[in-house]
Every structure is written in structure tokens, then in C-alpha cells.
Image (cartoon, coloured by chain):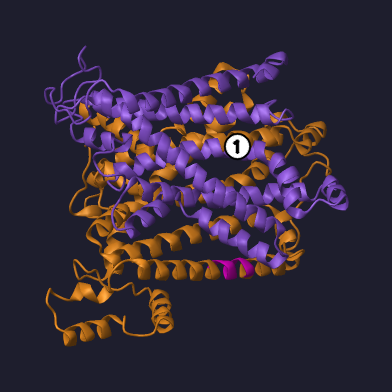
Chain colours: A purple, B orange
Amino acid sequence: MTALDLSADRPSRRHSLALSIGLALVGLNVAVAILTLFWTPYDPLNASGGRLEAPSLLHWVGTDRLGRDYLTQIMIGARTALIVGTGAVAIGASIGVTLGILAAFATRLLDDVMAATLDILIAFPTLLLAMLVVAASDSASLWSAILALGLAISAIVARLTRILAKRVLRQDYIIASRTSGTSWPGVVVRHVLPNIWPTLSVNFALQFGLAVIAEASLSYLGLGAPPPNASWGRLLQEAQGTVYTAPVGAIAPGIALVALVIGMNLLADGLRDVGDPTRGRSR
Amino acid sequence: MFLCKSQHYRPRASRPSDERNPAILAYILRRFAILILSLLIAAVVLFVLLRLLPGDPANALLSVGADQQQIEAAREQVGSNLPLWEQFLRFVGSLARFDLGTSFVSGKPVVEEIATRLTVTVPLALLGFALAVAIAVPLGILSAVKANRWYGAAISTISQLGIAIPVFWVGILLVTVFAVNLRLFPSGGYPRRGWQNEGQVLYALALPVLTIGLVMAASLIRYIRSATQDVLGSDYLRTARALGASYSQALIRHGIRNGAVPIVSILGIELATTLLGAVVVERVFALPGLGSMLLLAIEQRDYPNVQGVLFISTLLVLLIGFAADLLQRVIDPRLRERATGAAA
């Protein structure tokens, strides 16, 4: 960030602003998620409040239809969202980067087959793929959702990695490195990965946001983690039924979700600028 | 045309069709082969997936405490006693005949149920798509041309916001505003007699279509904006201007066609996404479409229905991709020539 502040042109400053806002939103989410491990305003299962209470000093965002504190559940939802996003991106990144690098090294025919298969997988919407995996596994759990989203992300990451790695492998310094005796794995670790990392990390941040949205959609459809786990999607689904009497419940979890996703997207924008100084003049 | 005084400015006319046809024909054939291959891959995935699911499909036909003889009879009827490869060939054969089996739960042919459901989902997706294009094209172009004005920046910001909002929440918010507060539209539901009552169908679809249209427009605007920026910064536009075309004339003559090439493939992907993304919107508004059929089938473990919906939606997605690719070739002659050249 400090490196960016030195440059005087306007767009760069705007991007460093994006990075700061993004960091703040994501940081707030992480802080809240960690906080819920030690403290929440109420016990999440404590149904001591009145039914569907309006926001008050005791219950800042009101209560749900069982009288449980709504803010507590939204805070725990932040934890769920972060776990899903991190888990899905971690799975997607490890499978995707490995496959992508292998494809970049593969023979022409194998490479073509992999590229075509990835294209077909990507044409298939993430949500449908996730629904499939969740349906195929016996009971819906947080982990089946994470696995499903991770697999969907891995196809996207693999395609990107393949293209980026091929571009790097064509460079002269790869030949130089090979001639000076570096093994292929050495080339990957020393040259390919560092060169493709800036673009990949931007993509990871974007995929994180998409995974959070997809998990919320799955829980909204009733295919997410079962009830003790609070998820913004399930909160919204429950609140939809009582939207006539308690509209706040149908709005608050959505704001939390959008804040996290926008934070991740802004972070991606900012990272793009930091990672690649040649870009970012105008978008 | 009056302004194209000089022959030089006239954009390159398309070549005589007899010279062009073999190229495009070869491309169509190649692309069609890929389509069939993709369908086969999809069939394999579906087949494997259904074998992964717990239980013999014959179980659905049996009651508790069936004896061995009844089990054998049921397995014969379903075909699960045959070797795997023969099951697979039968499976592909029946898919090719659009025979998707009968539902475990209702006992009705899956194809019939899907056909009924498509009368909800297809209009919903197409109307939402049309609304999104109607919103995104003018706004996307405006935000690129007037990037320095406040409204250009505002459009970009709002579209940034739009891609971070899950579609179901947009639906819930629209229900809160238009159904709960203003009482203009129903919060959900669908007329029982369907399209026999067109007015009521359109009334029921108004908010769902608005939901899809707004969300899709947000992501489309960004693509149209960047395609327009590419066109605006291009050399051919400058050349056209230098040859005497006015700004708007150069844009209309060269910009639209050039800018449309990447947009068409994006539109194809977006249309496919909408069709399948309708699952969520149908749930928000309790519409009896393909998506709610899939959800219900998953809940009831009605595997023929699950398989049927997945096959038909994959088919639709692949067909849309096929159409988008062909359309791109029609718009851009350069792609057509490349199609016959190098195989890549």
C-alpha cells in the first residue's frame, strides 16, 4: 500500500482506496467471526426474547420467530461464510493450480482434452454443480457444500492457471533457467508460480465472494448446513416467511453478506493494482 | 450511405457466398461434433452420478418386505440386473429418444412433467434476459462513453454493487417493497391454469422477471462497458473518423459489429446461467418451474426426475453455447476464415 501512495496519478489512488475499504470490510468480518468463538451478545439457542421483536436496545436487530437474538445469529453467520469461502477457495486452488500446471506441461492432445473438459465444466453453473454434490451426499452438511463449491472453483482456477502458465513457459528466461540446469519442478516453483501468483490471487478473492453467495443460495434453498449452524442464507429464508411483520430480519443478514462480498471484490481490485503495476490505468 | 463519398471508407464488403460457405459449413460440422461429444460426456457424468447414489433404482418399485422373486422381477423391469456397459448403452439410447423414464413419486413420464415446467421457466428466463439486455446495453455504453461524468461513474459503482448481491435477496427486497409496502404485485404464486390465463401469468411473473433482469443487468453492464471501451480506443474507429465519418456514424458502422463479437458469447453464457439460476428465483416466488421440480425431486429422492431435469438443462446450456458460437461467426468474418485454417 505504501508503494502505491507514492504514485501521484489519480486512478492509482482510487485503487488504493478500494484496497483500504476492502480490507476494512473483510477485516471487520474476520474480527466478528473470531469474536463469536469467545463471546456473542446472547446464547444462539437462547429463546428468551419475545417472538419477532422489533429492534431495541436489548436486541439490536430484533428477534426471530422463536425469540432468539437475531444479531447473535448474524454474527455466527459471518463465521460460517468465512469458513465456506476459505475452505472452498483452498480446495479449488490446490486442485485447480495442480491441474492447470499439469495441463500446461502435457502433450498437445492431452492438453486439448483437458481444456475442452474444463470448458464444459465451467459452462455448468456452480450452483447446480453444488446442488448435485449435496444431493448425492447422504445428508446436507457444511462440508458437502464446501467440497462442491471447491470443485466448481477448481475448474475455473485450472483453466486460468493453464493459460497463465503456458504464457510463462514460453518466455526466454525459462530456456535460460533450464540450460543452467534447473529441473522442471524447480522451474515451476522458482519461475512459474511467482509469475502467475498476482493474477491468481485476484481470482481467488473474486471466487471467495462468489462462494459466499453460492453457500447462501444453497442454504436459502434448504440444501446448506442443518439448523444449529447459522447461515445468512437460511436466516433470509426464514425471514422471508415473516417479511410482513418483521421486515428487518429480511434485510439485516443480506447487508452483512453484501458487505463481505463487496469487501472481497474491492480487495481483488486493489490486489490487481498492487500485483501488476502496468495495469490499473483505467478499467 | 450518403456520407461514404469515398470508396475507401466503405467497410469491406462481405465476399461472395460461394467462397465463404465451405468455411462456415466446416465450422458448423466441427462445432456440432463438439456439441454431440459434450452431450456424451454429460451422459457419462449423469450415469456415474446416478450409480453413486445409494440404493438400487429397483427399490422404488418395491414395498417393504418384498421377497427375492419380487426383487429380481423389479430389477429386470428397471434393467439394473444387466452388466454396467449394457445399462449405459440403454441409458444413452433412451436419452437419444428423449425417453427420460417415469417419476418414482408421481408415476408420470418425466418428459411430460418437464414440458409443463418449461412453460414457466423459459418465459421467466427469456423475459428476464430481455429486460437485462434492455437495461444493460444503453447503460453500459453510456458509462463507457461518459466515464468522466458523475453518472458514468455512478453506473459503474451500482453495477459493482449489483454483482455482490445474491439474486434471492434482490427478490426478497422487491417483495418487501412492491408486495408488502406498495401492494402492487403478488409476493409469489402462479395461476393454476397457466398460460390459459395470460394476464395473470404475466402479473405473477412481473417481480421474478424484474429480479432476474436487475441482477443480470448488473453483470452485463460491466462487459458491455469494457467492450465499448475497447471499441472507443481502437485504431479502426480513428481511421474511420479520419476518412470523414462523424463520431456517431463511425460508431454505428464499425463499433456495433466489432463490439458485438465478445458480447454475443457473454450473452450466451449469461442466458444459460439465467435459465439455471431461475432455480433460486422460482423458490423465492413459489413458481412451479424446472428449478422447483429439481428441488422437490432432490428432497423426495426421485432420481428419474433429478436425472431428467439435469439432462434437459445441460442440453439447453449446450445448445445456447452452440448458437452463440455460430452467431459470432456470422457477425465476425475473421473468425470464419480462421475456422478452416489452423485446427486450433
Residue at image point 60% right, 59% down: B326
Q: Is residue A222 above or below residue B314?
A: above
Residue B182 lies in what quarter of the image? top left
Q: Nearer the viewer, residue A82 or B130?
A: A82
Can the viewer see residue A9? yes
Mark 1 belongs to which subunit? A
Residue A151, magenta (yes or no) = no
Counting from the top left corner in percent of width and height, residue A13 is at 64, 16
Residue at image point 50% right, 37% down: B219
Provide the residue span drawn in magenta: B30-35
- For mark 1, give the secondary structure: helix
Counting from the top left corner in percent of width and height, residue A278 is at 74, 29
Side (left or right) of A113 relative to B95 = right
What residue does disc 1 label?
Answer: A201
Residue B48 lies in what quarter of the image? bottom left
In which quadrant of the rendered image does the C terminus of chain B lie?
bottom right
Kindly identify the amino acid type of the residue bearing the numbered disc 1: Ser
Q: Is residue A275 above or below residue B309?
A: above
Q: Is residue A101 above or below residue B71?
A: above
- Could you tell me what secondary structure mostly forms the magenta stretch? helix
Q: Nearer the viewer, residue A225 or B143?
A: A225
Q: Nearer the viewer, residue B132 or A49?
A: A49
Can the viewer see residue B220? no
